Image (tube, rainbow, N blue to C red):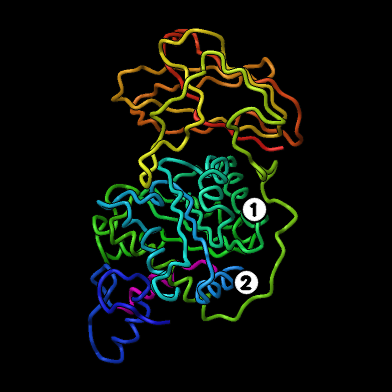
């Protein structure tokens, strides 16, 4: 492995610099914290939960080195999108892409393609709905390396665990070339790594957990909270670099290891019923028939991707405050149905209200699209959950008292 820069922000180079410094007696360092290179290396080592079965990841690395086209995608929440630093491109995902390209790709690294698919406030169960749209369709195919980071967005509930497993499972099944990495980011309130580790181990994928190392460093005053966090969850530029360096440490470890024998994707799921095969609903298809009623407009103020400054859910169903008419109705054959609605930004003049959701004539729940402190954020809810697919009728209508308010169905996803 070669070093293309001795100083600056070329990530992953701290591993090589540590060796060079030890030989020369220099105390210079490329890492972001004022600690010794050996201590920083130990911190990176301690984030490595497991290299899993390295067969797929080593294949991807070999392709990068050989100049073959390789695609890298990062799927997650706001940490993956790059929240925290002044520039979102200083987020760990972008830093890792630059480091991987600098360390392993020949020439200018034009053979390595990147898709940053982070979206603020989104959990695994929405990730599985938008995976095809935001990763596969963007890349024009399945990624060679996929990093999944939802550990600080997911709750500790079964809904989140099933979403995470479906993401891992579907990516592995979709292509024998896709190497999946589970990344567990840190927050002052913790993360859900404990929930995800058994799933990741079941599928033998590499795992990197940032939280225990950051907690230990803070308790020992190795660095301060303001050195790592900009708030309670989003890292500083230096914190993002530590995440990137930890991923590069995984890559370096795998690169030096012997290649494992190829393994099959397990036939059984840990969490059932499985969300595997989730499909986003954008219009009618062979299993879906929609009558939008008053929800027949498009909301242009849904969540915006930092990388495009465009809404991520253009195919939504929006009832404006001034709209009158029938409820949203859908006939669908499915096993699971995930509904995602928008919580209106509190600064916007149009007021949003609550909508009632019915399945086969039975009320499921009422969802508040005008909740306090909304920021156009998405809320995902599981409204159908069965072991086998069946025909259902779904109706969404404004709750009493909210008839003259707005509501947006951001997206829906179903599985058979």
333 w.r.t. 108: above or below: above
Residue 56 lies within the magenta run = no
> Which residues are the magenta region?
37-54
Question: Would residue 227 appear left or right of 280 to someone viewing this image?
Answer: left
C-alpha distance separating marks 1 and 2: 16 Å
Give the quadrant of residue 248: bottom left
Residue highlighted by disc 2: 55
Report the front residue among 235 and 224.
Answer: 235
> How far across and down, in percent of the image, does residue 55 sit?
62, 71
Residue 51 lies within the magenta run = yes
Question: Would residue 257 appear left or right of 35 to someone viewing this image?
Answer: right
Q: Residues within 10 Å of mark 2 (few under 14, many from 20)?
A: some
Residue highlighted by disc 1: 169
Q: Residue at x 75, y 33 (%)?
A: 389
Tag 2 or tag 1, which sits nearer the N-term? 2
Report the front residue among 358 and 99.
Answer: 99
177 w.r.t. 7: above or below: above
Magenta stretch, overall SS: helix
């Amino acid at each position: 492995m070669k070093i293309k820069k001795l100083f600056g922000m070329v990530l992953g180079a701290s591993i090589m610099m540590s060796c060079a410094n030890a030989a020369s007696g220099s105390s210079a360092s490329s890492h972001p914290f004022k600690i010794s290179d050996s201590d920083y290396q130990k911190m990176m080592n301690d984030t490595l939960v497991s290299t899993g079965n390295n067969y797929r990841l080593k294949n991807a690395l070999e392709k990068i080195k050989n100049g073959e086209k390789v695609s890298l995608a990062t799927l997650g929440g706001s940490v993956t999108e790059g929240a925290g630093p002044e520039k979102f491109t200083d987020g760990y995902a972008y830093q890792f892409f630059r480091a991987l390209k600098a360390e392993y790709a020949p020439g200018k690294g034009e053979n390595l393609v990147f898709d940053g698919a982070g979206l603020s406030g989104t959990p695994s169960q929405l990730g599985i709905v938008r995976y095809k749209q935001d990763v596969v369709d963007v890349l024009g195919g399945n990624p060679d390396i996929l990093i999944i980071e939802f550990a600080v967005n997911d709750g500790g509930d079964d809904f989140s665990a099933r979403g995470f497993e479906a993401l891992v499972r579907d990516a592995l099944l979709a292509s024998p070339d896709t190497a999946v990495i589970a990344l567990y980011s840190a927050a002052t309130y913790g993360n859900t790594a404990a929930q995800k580790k058994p799933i990741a181990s079941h599928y033998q994928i590499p795992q990197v957990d940032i939280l225990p190392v950051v907690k230990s460093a803070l308790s020992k005053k190795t660095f301060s909270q303001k050195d790592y966090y900009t708030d309670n969850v989003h890292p500083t530029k230096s914190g993002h670099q530590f995440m990137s360096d930890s991923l590069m440490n995984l890559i370096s470890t795998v690169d030096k290891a012997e290649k494992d024998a190829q393994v099959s994707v397990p036939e059984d799921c840990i969490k059932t019923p499985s969300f595997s095969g989730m499909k986003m609903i954008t219009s009618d298809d062979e299993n879906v028939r929609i009558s939008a009623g008053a929800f027949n407009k498009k909301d242009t103020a849904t969540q915006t991707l930092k990388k495009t400054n465009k809404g991520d859910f253009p195919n939504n169903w929006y009832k404006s405050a001034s709209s009158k008419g029938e409820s949203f109705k859908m006939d669908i054959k499915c096993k699971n149905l995930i509904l995602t609605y928008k919580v209106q930004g509190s600064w916007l003049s149009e007021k949003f209200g609550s909508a009632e959701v019915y399945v086969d004539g039975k009320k499921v729940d009422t969802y508040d699209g005008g909740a306090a402190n909304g920021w156009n954020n998405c809320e995902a809810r599981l409204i159908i959950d069965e072991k086998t697919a069946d025909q259902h009728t779904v109706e969404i209508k404004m709750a009493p008292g909210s008839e003259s308010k707005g509501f947006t169905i951001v997206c829906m996803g179903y599985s058979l």
